[in-house]
Image (cartoon, rainbow, N blue to C red):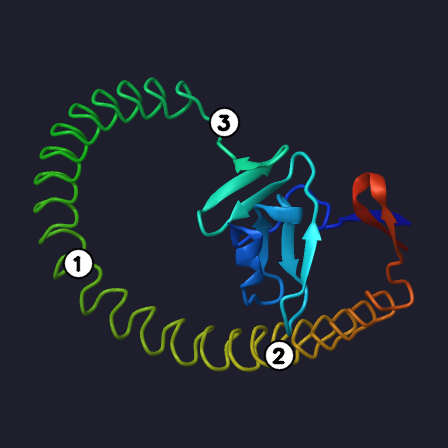
Amino acid sequence: MATKRIACQDEFPFQPNVKSQVTAAVLAGLTPAKGDRYIVTDGANANQITYCSNATGPVWTYLVPTEGWLVFVEDVDKYYKFITSWTEYIGQVGATGATGAVGPTGAVGPTGAVGPTGAVGPTGAVGPTGAVGPTGVAGPTGAVGPTGVAGPTGAVGPTGAVGPTGVAGPTGAVGPTGVAGPTGAVGPTGAVGPTGVAGPTGAVGPTGVAGPTGAVGPTGVAGPTGAVGPTGAQGATGPNAIYVAEYHCLEIEFD
């Protein structure tokens, strides 16, 4: 038997986003949607996170934060932490970190003036992509190189009218990818092939919608191990949860 613990969101230190920080007066004038969350900044509920718990009117439920809570405030695009009050959470990267003056992107780092992408680096004037490099005028992709006018992909090269990709070549009308070839209508990927509608991975195949692992199959949503099956969430061996205060969670036992 396995035991799983599921965090209680009302007590979890990493809280879902809030829309904004607002005063009690502003909160009273809002027309929220169910689930909208705010930090209250003053009054009897100061520092508490509140969320709308009713779909038909502003019924507010309040959460009392504890030290270490962290939340993202959407209207300012910033994280806030709670110690004794909510303050902006500042990251830990200092002046001598990886992006500092002497770090890998600094003045003398690998992308600096004398680094591998500098004036004398591999992409410089005399580097491998320079005027005399492998992609230069006289290089392998230049005017007289292997992909040039007279090279293997030129007008009389292997991709010409009578080459391997021509009308009668291997990708032509009667070639391996043609109408009657292995990827054609009756080939392995055709309507009755292994990946076709009636094939093993098709809509009615063993992994299809109606197959043994499909939506209505034995492991599907309505199958014996599905959401309403005998081992599903509402099934005979489904979870029985108890609250464990020391972990701020629900503890669930599974067979």
Are circles 3 and 1 on residues that touch, CB within 8 Å?
A: no
Element assignment for label 1: loop
- Between the residue at mark 1 and the residue at mark 2, the CA separation in whole angstroms equals 45 Å
**In the displayed structure, does residue 103 sit left or right of residue 125?**
right
27 up-or-down from 224: above or below: above
| Front-lying residue, 109 or 212 | 109
Q: Residues within 10 Å of mark 2 (few under 14, many from 20)?
A: some
**Looking at the image, is mark 2 or mark 3 nearer the viewer?**
3
Residue depicted at x 9% and y 39%: 138
Q: Residues within 10 Å of mark 3 (few under 14, many from 20)?
A: few
Mark 1 is on which residue type?
Gly
Name the kind of residue labelled 3 in the image: Gln
Please state which of residues 16 and 65 is positioned toward the viewer in this rendering. Answer: 65
Residue 81 percent across, percent down from the top left:
58, 37
Q: Residues within 10 Å of mark 1 (few under 14, many from 20)?
A: some
- State the residue position of label 3: 92
Q: Give, as a three-letter code, the residue at label 2.
A: Ala
Which of the numbered marks, if any, corresponds to residue 157?
A: 1
Q: Is residue 132 left or right of residue 19?
A: left
Q: Secondary structure at mark 3?
A: loop
Mark-to-mark CA distance, 3 and 1: 60 Å
From the top left corner, tell me how far across and down residue 169 is, in percent.
Answer: 29, 70
User: Would you identify the image quadrant in which residue 192 lies?
Assistant: bottom right
